[in-house]
Image (spheres, grey):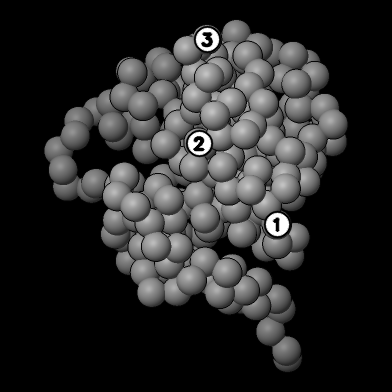
């Protein structure tokens, strides 16, 4: 599979690139800063300069051409409300339109758990971030793409164990970035896991089994 990563230099993105390349996929990692190119190349992916803010839909579509799938894990990462709107919001919308234009039908969005850090008193900027993330989910879910929205819990950097709790609705909790990447790697290659929002935390279930269970839950129940 030929996969285009938006957010390839991030904590989930670098881990995911390594897994995708290891299974034999061809991965292109988009980056804005020149300093990120070496980090992306070290994963086995091909770095490509791009800018979610400056690039229009046509420019993004040209980059996405000849790819089968897109993984969007980019984010403003606390750089302010305007950047959040431009990257997490408008950036996702442009990317979805570009994917449709380029024929990259499979689209995985790394979103945010609705209960993320609620009650923490993080202020208006965080509430704005959560509104933008929800709007991005709504926009992608209304598209004709073969989409999958993954909502991980509170992200941690400790080494993962490849085990998760995944479902249409699960209790909020923590999840290691390694485990997020492992789940996306497996889910991306399961074509029947489509047009679904998945909540994800660390848990007891191997990612392959979690994906299999989700595919069963997506099938119509017998009448």
Question: Of discs 1 and 2, which sits in the foreground?
Answer: 2
Residue at label 2? Answer: 14
Dot 2: element: helix
- On the image, the x and y values in percent for residue 131 come to 40, 36
Q: In the rendered image, which residue does mark 1 sit on?
A: 189
Please tell me whether residue 201 is drawn above or below residue 137 in the rendered image.
below
Say what secondary structure mark 3 lies in.
Answer: loop
Choose top left, top right, bottom left or bottom right for residue 75.
top left
Q: Earlier in the sequence, mark 1 or mark 3?
A: 3
Q: Are marks 1 and 2 in contact (CB under 8 Å)?
A: no
Q: Is residue 64 left or right of residue 137?
A: right
Marks 1/2: CA–CA distance: 18 Å
Q: Position of residue 15 (x, y in %)?
A: 49, 42
Is 113 placed above or below 87 here?
A: below
Say if residue 123 shows up in the picture.
yes
Give the residue at mark 3.
34
Q: Nearer the viewer, residue 173 or 123?
A: 173
The residue located at (20%, 30%) in the rendering is: 123
Residue shown at 53% from the left, 71% from the top? 210
- Give the x, y percent position of residue 36: 49, 18
Task: Let me know if residue 109 appears in the view.
Answer: no
Q: Residue at x 73, y 89 (%)?
A: 222
What residue is rendered at 53% in x and 58% in y?
Answer: 183
Quadrant location of the C terminus?
A: bottom right
């Amino acid at each position: 599979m030929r996969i285009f990563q938006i957010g390839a230099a991030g904590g989930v993105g670098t881990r995911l690139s390594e897994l995708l390349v290891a299974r034999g996929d061809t991965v292109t990692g988009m980056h804005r800063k020149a300093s990120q190119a070496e980090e992306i190349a070290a994963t086995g992916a091909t770095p490509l300069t791009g800018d979610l803010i400056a690039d229009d839909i046509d420019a993004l579509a040209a980059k996405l051409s000849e790819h089968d799938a897109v993984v969007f894990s980019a984010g403003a990462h606390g750089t302010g409300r305007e950047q959040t709107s431009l990257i997490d919001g408008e950036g996702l919308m442009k990317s979805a339109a570009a994917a449709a234009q380029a024929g990259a039908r499979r689209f995985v969005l790394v979103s945010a758990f609705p209960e993320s850090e609620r009650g923490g008193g993080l202020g208006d900027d965080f509430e704005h971030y959560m509104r933008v993330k929800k709007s991005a989910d709504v926009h992608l879910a209304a598209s004709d793409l073969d989409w999958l929205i993954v909502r991980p819990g509170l992200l941690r950097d400790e080494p993962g164990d490849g085990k998760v709790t995944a479902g249409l609705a699960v209790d909020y909790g923590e999840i290691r970035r390694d485990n997020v990447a492992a789940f996306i790697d497996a889910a991306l290659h399961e074509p029947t896991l489509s047009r679904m929002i998945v909540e994800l935390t660390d848990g007891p279930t191997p990612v392959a089994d979690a994906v299999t269970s989700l595919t069963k839950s997506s099938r119509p129940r017998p009448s």
